[in-house]
Amino acid sequence: MPGNDALSVLEPIQRPSIADSVFDELHRQILRLELPPGTKLSEFDVARALGVSRQPVRDAFYRLSKLGFLTIRPQRATTVSAISERAVLQARFIRMAIELETARVACQTLTEADFLAMEAILAQQERAVAARDPAAFHDLDDQFHREICERAGAGFAWETAREMKSHMDRVRYLSLSFASERAFLEHKDILAAIRARDPDRAAQMVRLHLSRILDQIVRIRAENAAYFADEG
């Protein structure tokens, strides 16, 4: 049977590498404070715990160090980096710039089907708040913001912000013990403004929402001083 020349242009399906999986797992545990700042890690222990060789762990350590989440000192222990307040505020600046514009675009582009999908996410968030499940709420919070970008046709913008915003995520996660209900209500306000096709109101709600971290970080630092870097 003759071959199909058209198939020659197809790209092989890409699957996550072991190094990617190791990176994702360590990144998740660091952001959720399952591996809090100051935790010592070794390639050997992580490789054994995850059932992989040391090379993908070494690769993941390097990527995490470049993002500022691990401190690697040759001949000394690798440790989870302290939270940098400077990096948190820089991440907020980038998110603000991206999400203000995305909210405005969303006012023009989201459809009724999009709004129904977003409301389903809000319903899940409400259940997570009621269940006092910060891990679930954190994931749904990310999903809410990502979906607005993607449904507005600006998924590329979320990809640009994603790695940088990780520096906000440890502070955001710590804030959920006292701020998840407020975050949920602000998500409702953001979606309501977008649904009303009111770009100024939508941008205002996004600005208010992303500015909460300025007050939260003061409280969180006072309660978790050991987690933060001394940047004086």
Image (cartoon, helix red, strand yellow):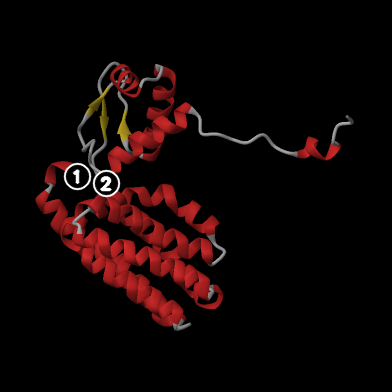
Position of residue 196 in the picture relative to residue 221 (left or right):
right
Question: Which residue is found at the position 18% from the left and 56% from the top?
Answer: 132
Q: Residues within 10 Å of mark 2 (few under 14, many from 20)?
A: some
Q: Is residue 115 above or below residue 7?
A: below
Question: Which residue is found at the position 42% from the left and 47% from the top?
Answer: 163
Label 1 sits on a secondary structure element that is loop
Q: Residue 32: image x %, image y %?
A: 26, 44
Q: Is residue 89 above or below residue 126?
A: above
Q: Residue 115: image x %, image y %?
A: 46, 72
Count every numbered label the image shows and give the total: 2
Q: Which mark is residue 228?
A: 1
Three-letter code for the amino acid on which mark 2 is drawn: Ser
Q: Is residue 32 above or below residue 123?
A: above
> Which corner quadrant of the image does residue 24 belong to?
top left
Which mark sits nearer the N-terminus, 2 or 1? 2
Question: Which residue is found at the position 57% from the left and 64% from the top?
Answer: 153
Q: Residue 93: image x %, image y %?
A: 38, 61
Circles 2 and 1, Cβ within 8 Å, touching? The answer is: yes
Quadrant for the N terminus in the image: top right
Q: Which mark is residue 13?
A: none
Examine the rendering and report whether any part of residue 62 can be seen.
yes
Three-letter code for the amino acid on which mark 1 is drawn: Phe
Position of residue 211 in the picture relative to residue 56 (left or right):
left
Residue identifier under label 2: 84
Examine the rendering and report whether any part of residue 101 can be seen.
no
- In the image, farthest residue toward the front: 1
Q: Residue 119: image x %, image y %?
A: 39, 69
